[in-house]
Every structure is written in C-alpha cells, then in structure tokens.
Image: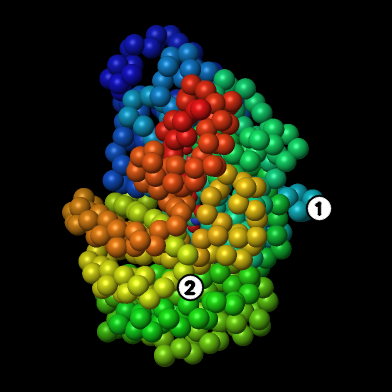
C-alpha cells in the first residue's frame, strides 16, 4: 500500500486502530510525520503509510494483528540506528517502540529489565546508579533492542562479553501477535536465535540482563598520533595487545582531527591522525600500569587516557556520530593485523577526505571468544579485529566520493576477510547475510524462522529466509 493509498484500508478500521492504541498513530499529513519517519542516517528517506507508536505490549500486539489483517509490510524501530535504515519502510507500517522506555534494576538479583525503546545511554544511567553496567555499544544514542538482537560489541566486551552474553530473557510478540518468553529455560531454541539473529523472529518488547559491577570511574580514553606514525604505532600496538589481559579492550580509529578535540596541538587540526582508545574494566591502578607502555610510545600528540566516569566514556564519541548526517559503512572481521593490513590501513587512512569520515577497528578476543561458537546465533567469536569503515558527510554533497572510498578500502582488505558482524551490514543482499552467519548457523536459523515466522512477516531486517 502506498502512502497516498491509505483509503485502500477502510477509514473506519484505521480510526478504530488509532483509537485503540495507548500510544499514537501517525500518518502522512500529521504534524509530527516527518520527524517520526526520520532515522539516524539522513541518507535514508522513506515514507511509511502508518507509524504505530506503541506505548506497551498491548499496542504491539494490536499493531502486528492490524498489519497482518491488512497485509502491510512492517518495519520495526527501536533506536532507529540501523545503518541501512531498516527501522523505516516505504509504504507499510512502522512499529515504533521508542515510547517504551521503562527500565527497572533489581539490585538484589543484580539484574535489569529494559523495554525495547531504551537507548544505551539510558540503560547506562540507570545501571550506574547501582554501580553496575551491561556491556553494550559505544554511542549512547544507539537503540538497545537492535544492538542486542544482533550481538552487541563494545568497550568492555573482552572482560564482560557481548551484550547477548549478559542477556537472561526476552519478551517477544510473534508474527501471529502472540506473546512468548524466551530464556535458557523457556523456548530455548528461540532464545538461541534471538542472540544474534536480529529482528527475524518477532518483536522483542522487553529484555532482562545480568548486571556486572563496574565504575563509577574507570581508566580509559584515546591517545593520538599523526597518521605518518601509523606504521610504527600499529606494529607496536599489535605486539602490545598480543598478551594483554581481558580487562583491556581497545579501539583503533583513523580520521582527520576535529577542531573540537580539546588539547590537540593547533598544527594537527584537520590533519590525518590515528588514535588508540583503551578501556580498562578493572582497577584504576592496574589500568594505568597496563596502558603505560602505549602512553610512552613515540611521544603521542595528545593523550586523553586517564581515570574518567564510565558514563563520560560511554558518551565520548557521540559528537562524531550525531543523527542527521549521511553515513555509509562497510565492515569485515580479520584474524590479525598483519603487515599487509597495516599497509592498507595507512594507505586508505591517508586518503580520507571528509572531515567526519572515520575508520574504527575493534579488538576482539577475551570473554567474547570463550563462549562457544554454537551457543548463540551470533557468528564470529574468534574474530581478531572488526573493521568498520565509515564514509560520512553532513549532506549529499561528497557522499558518493566517500562511498567509493569505503568500497576501495573494504575491497583492499578482502583477501583477509573472515566473518562479518550482522549489525554492521548495509543492505548487501542474501549472500552477505549467509556469510555473516556461516552456512551451518544460517541453516539452523532458517529452520527457526520457519517455526516462528513461516510467512516472513518480519522481513525488513538482515533477512533470514524461512526454510
Ligand atoms: C552511531 C552508531 C554506533 C553504533 N555502535 C555500535 C556498537 O558499539 N556496537 C554494536 O554492536 N553495534 C553498534 N552499532 C550498530 C547497531 O547495533 C545497529 O545499528 C542496531 O541495529 C541499532 O539498533 P536500533 O534499535 O537503534 O536500530 P533500529 O533501526 O531501530 O532497528 C534496527 C533493526 O533491528 C531490529 N529491531 C529493533 N528493535 C527491535 C525489537 N524490539 N524487536 C525486534 N527487532 C527489532 C529490526 O529488524 C530493525 O529493523 C552502532 C550503530 C550506530 C548508528
């Protein structure tokens, strides 16, 4: 159904649906329509026919049943941060969970329950009030739901595991509009699939996580060098992390240094830089000791690695990824940073044009790699490093050039690709989705999809085809 064909759904039925919702039904022409259809990535511009802003489980059930009855394509929106913009569709219905923001910490049980519209920064804030954290992503306005269902990598993963490794249960509405619970004890097959299988099996309405003591202050932050020094810095880095403790997780970035970076020598503003961000999920003293060799390597241009509140760390990179810019990504995992890969990083780092384009390379291993590959649908636990190559602009101007650079960079790494993280995929086709899961896991996921969503009702996602 096209946005201008709403009349093909009985007006009475639409009005009745709208009045049943405890939340809100937004349609083309409504004042808030443009705001509500927009997602984080401004290169995505889609026009849904209906946006059902659900206030609770009853609204989600109603929305699923309405969409089914009227055969509407459904897009599910948590935080709206999907790179390819799967949280919105042309025509059809967006089931928008952003009103569902409840969080409840149980300090005795050391668990937290969070509804599907919660953003990472909100989860951090509530859990830090109890001196705890759930490991998740590094930008605090990312949606918890989409991130968790794909796996969830982040700053403390080598110590605390992926977000899904801390997941205890999920409440879910199926394609039939039925409520089910998934945990190790109930619907264990579904619980396996939800830990990495994305939004393929239903709409998650609430998540329960185990809490980990962390903070309020941890030893963390980036250290910068001019990109000219990257060949030496990266070789040093490779040796330094070779036998580092699980408490340490690192992220390598390359970009042009922004003028807003406090303390940066003036001659480096706008110049290509390499940064290594270290996060030590342990004592401050130990963290200082572990990071000391890196701090001493080759007189860094700027060292901002120091004790800092965990909440500050979790928002440190927000300014580099605001909603409303144009973003394009390609990702791959590699086993190790060999000399060839270092050469590629240096070569393409030097070619960065846009002042907001950025490469991120996550260090893997640690607790992530100690969960069995078969235990969850997430694939790639043995990845050494995860590349996320982002070509970004503030508007359409220059976007094509950034996309082309991303492709060249990613292609140069192709001989070394191992797996790819499903939450870092763009709209890249079924073959890439199969690659992301590997043949065996993909077949198991297809069987699960056949069981829980045989008609592929939930298909605006990294779609797993029913068996
Ligand atoms: C700035 C930025 C930083 C990021 N950093 C990280 C990071 O550090 N670590 C990491 O692992 N990932 C990271 N990501 C990737 C992120 O995990 C995915 O983009 C994820 O899909 C975002 O979830 P969302 O709820 O915000 O997205 P949305 O666009 O709302 O949803 C994306 C898809 O997830 C599914 N989905 C969302 N909510 C539900 C639900 N309640 N039930 C069923 N399906 C649902 C749907 O298929 C939907 O299309 C980042 C992304 C961005 C844009």
The x and y percentages for residue 276 are: 45, 75
Tell me, for residue 277, which label it has, or none. 2
Looking at the image, residue 277 lies above or below residue 156: below
Q: Residue at x 44, y 46 (%)?
A: 435
Q: Residue at x 73, y 50 (%)?
A: 111
The x and y percentages for residue 154 are: 54, 60
Looking at the image, residue 366 lies above or below residue 234: above
Residue linked to disc 1: 108
Looking at the image, residue 451 lies above or below residue 464: above
Q: Image check: 450 left or right of 263?
A: right
Q: Image check: 52 left or right of 324?
A: right
The x and y percentages for residue 340 are: 35, 72
Camera sees residue 432: yes
Looking at the image, residue 299 lies above or below residue 148: below
> Alpha-carbon neighbours of circle 2 within 10 Å: few (<14), some, or many (≥20)?
some
SS at mark 1 in the image = loop
Camera sees residue 113: no
Depth check, front residue: 123 or 400: 400
């Amino acid at each position: 159904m096209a946005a201008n064909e709403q009349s093909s759904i009985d007006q009475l039925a639409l009005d009745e649906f709208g009045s049943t919702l405890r939340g809100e039904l937004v349609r083309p022409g409504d004042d808030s329509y443009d705001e509500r259809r927009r997602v984080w990535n401004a290169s995505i511009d889609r026009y849904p026919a209906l946006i059902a802003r659900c206030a609770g489980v009853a609204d989600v059930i109603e929305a699923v049943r309405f969409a089914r009855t009227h055969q509407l394509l459904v897009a599910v929106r948590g935080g709206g941060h999907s790179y390819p913009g799967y949280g919105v569709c042309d025509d059809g219905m967006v089931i928008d969970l952003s009103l569902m923001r409840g969080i409840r910490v149980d300090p005795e049980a050391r668990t937290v329950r969070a509804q599907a519209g919660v953003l990472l920064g909100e989860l951090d804030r509530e859990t830090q009030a109890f001196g705890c954290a759930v490991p998740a992503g590094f930008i605090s306005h990312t949606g918890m739901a989409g991130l968790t269902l794909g796996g969830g990598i982040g700053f403390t993963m080598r110590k605390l595991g992926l977000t899904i490794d801390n997941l205890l249960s999920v409440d879910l509405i199926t394609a039939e509009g039925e409520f089910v619970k998934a945990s190790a004890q109930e619907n264990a097959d579904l619980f396996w699939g939800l830990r990495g299988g994305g939004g393929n099996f239903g709409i998650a309405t609430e998540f329960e996580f185990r809490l980990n003591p962390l903070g309020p202050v941890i030893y963390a932050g980036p250290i910068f060098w001019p990109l000219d020094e990257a060949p030496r810095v990266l070789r040093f880095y490779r040796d330094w992390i070779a036998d580092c403790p699980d408490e340490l997780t690192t992220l390598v970035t390359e970009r042009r240094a922004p003028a807003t970076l406090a303390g940066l020598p003036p001659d480096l503003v706008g110049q290509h830089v390499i940064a290594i961000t270290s996060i030590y999920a342990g004592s401050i003293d130990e963290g200082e000791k572990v990071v000391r060799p890196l701090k001493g390597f080759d007189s860094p241009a700027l060292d901002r690695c120091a004790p800092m509140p965990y909440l500050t760390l979790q928002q440190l990179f927000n300014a580099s990824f605001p909603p409303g810019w144009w973003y394009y990504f390609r990702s791959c995992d590699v086993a190790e940073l060999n000399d060839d890969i270092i050469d590629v990083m240096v070569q393409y780092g030097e070619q960065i044009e846009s002042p907001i384009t950025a490469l991120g390379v996550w260090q893997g291993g640690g607790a992530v790699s100690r969960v069995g590959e078969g235990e969850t649908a997430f694939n790639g636990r043995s990845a050494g490093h995860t590349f996320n190559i982002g070509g970004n602009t503030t508007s359409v101007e220059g976007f094509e050039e950034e996309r082309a650079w991303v492709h060249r960079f990613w292609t140069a790494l192709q001989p070394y690709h191992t797996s790819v993280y499903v939450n870092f995929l763009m709209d890249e086709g079924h073959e890439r989705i199969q690659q992301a899961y590997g043949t065996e896991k993909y077949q198991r996921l297809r069987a699960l999809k056949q069981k829980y969503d045989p008609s592929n009702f939930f298909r605006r996602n990294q779609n797993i085809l029913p068996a």
